[in-house]
Amino acid sequence: MKSPLRLAILTACLSFPLAVLAADKPKPKSPFAAADVNGDGKISAEEYTTASKGQLDATAARAKFAALDTNKDGSLSRGEFAAGQAKKAPRKKKDMPSN
């Protein structure tokens, strides 16, 4: 009877540190939160250009920012940013027209 009890205690002792380590991992930021460097809830042209490095050159990033800024207030709201992300998402096969 002592052997199953020891096994249970050993398992619990080994599992606890793993559970603690898993809980300490920070959640990944959303693309909007990652681009909103100053945390003001909107993305400036400078923040967008910086976040787009590696995907777009500065000129293309500024042009895309201007197109996404539909209310022309000089910043992207979550809605404007999300609309740009939705346009960028690839279409699934079932959404494509058949020949």
Image (cartoon, helix red, strand yellow):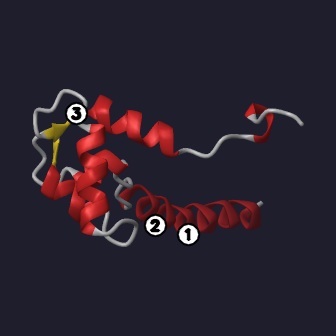
Q: Secondary structure at mark 2?
A: helix
Q: Amino acid at mark 1?
A: Leu
Could you classify mark 1 by the number of other residues whose Cα lies within 10 Å: few (under 14), some (14-19), or many (20 or more)?
A: few
Disc on the earlier residue, 2 or 3: 2
Mark whose residue sits in front, 2 or 3: 3
Q: Amino acid at mark 3?
A: Ser
The residue at 30%/46% (across/down) is: 32
Q: Quadrant of residue 59?
A: bottom left
Quadrant location, the N terminus: bottom right
Q: Residue furthest bottom?
A: 54
Above or below 70: residue 74? below
Instruction: Single out the mark in the foreground, 3 or 1.
Output: 3
Residue drawn at point x = 57 percent, y = 60 percent? 12
Which residue type carries mark 2?
Pro
- Image coords of residue 88 (percent x, y): 50, 46
Identify the disc placed on residue 14. Answer: 1
* Residue picked out by circle 2: 17
User: Quarter of the image holding residue 74?
Assistant: top left
Q: For the residue labelled by badge 1, is the local secondary structure a helix, a strand or a loop?
A: helix
